[in-house]
Amino acid sequence: MSDLDPQVMAILEEAQRHGVIGKAPLASHIDQARSFFSFVEDLLPTDARLLDLGSGGGLPGLVIADGWPKLRVSLLDGRSSRAESLGLALDELGWGDRLTVIAQRAEEAGRDLRHRASYDLVVARGFGPPAVAAECAAPFLKIGGLLVVSDPPGGGQSERWPVEGCGVLGLEIIKSQVSPWSFTALRQRELCDDRYPRRTGVPLKRPLFN
């Protein structure tokens, strides 16, 4: 944790004080955040375009941006207060040339042509159930792009990420791990169908798979 930019640390500490980041030690949160990218780093270009889906207090997006400065990172959050806080954080860091904040719901931004099929990597930390994360993430991904999602301890790709359900969105599982952090990585083998994402709230109310 010692090599994290002190300004990033201060931003994360403030977010944790306000309850936007969980109560676990920040060292643990930071280690997991870095692992989102290192898990698939060898599969991505060095200047990859990354979307942090539901960035909240800036995890994992700010930590990844700090560790891999060639990446172009978008922090998406549909809650205006959190998006505003993220924008202020970028102003403090002076990272406006390579980081942006998207103050939209994922279902809306996923239909925006500025973002659709534009990203090499989408990361989702606690965004929602697998079906919701998959439907909201897939529209952002280029062909060959990757989605990395944090799973609960123990993972369970066959139970949480059914082949048929993911396939509807053009996704296929390529790797998973359960230690030290539990992740599933999926590849966008073909562009997501224009039917998705559905209207705001529908992915959660009527998930494509369970």
Image: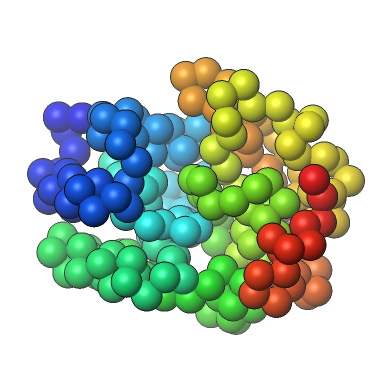
Name the residue at 65% across, 48% down: 129
Q: Quadrant of residue 97?
A: bottom left
Q: Quadrant of the C terminus?
A: top right
Q: Is residue 138 visible?
A: no
Q: Residue at x 74, y 36 (%)?
A: 160
Answer with left or right where residue 85 lies relative to residue 150. Answer: left
Q: Is 24 left or right of 2, judged from the image as shown?
A: right
Q: Does residue 172 appear in this view? A: yes
> Which residue extends farthest right?
164
User: On screen, 200 above or below 121?
Assistant: below
- Give how far across and how far down residue 143 sits, in percent: 69, 58
Depth check: 81 or 67 in front? 81
152 on left or right of 167: left
Residue at horizontal 54 percent and vertical 52 percent from the top = 127
Comparing 160 with 98, the one in front is 160
Which residue shows up at 25% across the image and 67% down it?
85
Q: Say how the picture is coloured.
A: rainbow
Where is residue 2? Give x, y as percent.
14, 29
Q: Position of residue 134 (x, y in %)?
A: 68, 53
Q: Residue furthest bottom?
A: 113
89 above or below 187? Answer: below
All told, the count of numbered labels is 0
149 over 169 or under it: above or below: above
- Indicate the quadrant where residue 1 lies: top left
Is 27 situated left or right of 120 in this image? Answer: left
Q: Determine which quarter of the picture holds residue 135.
A: bottom right
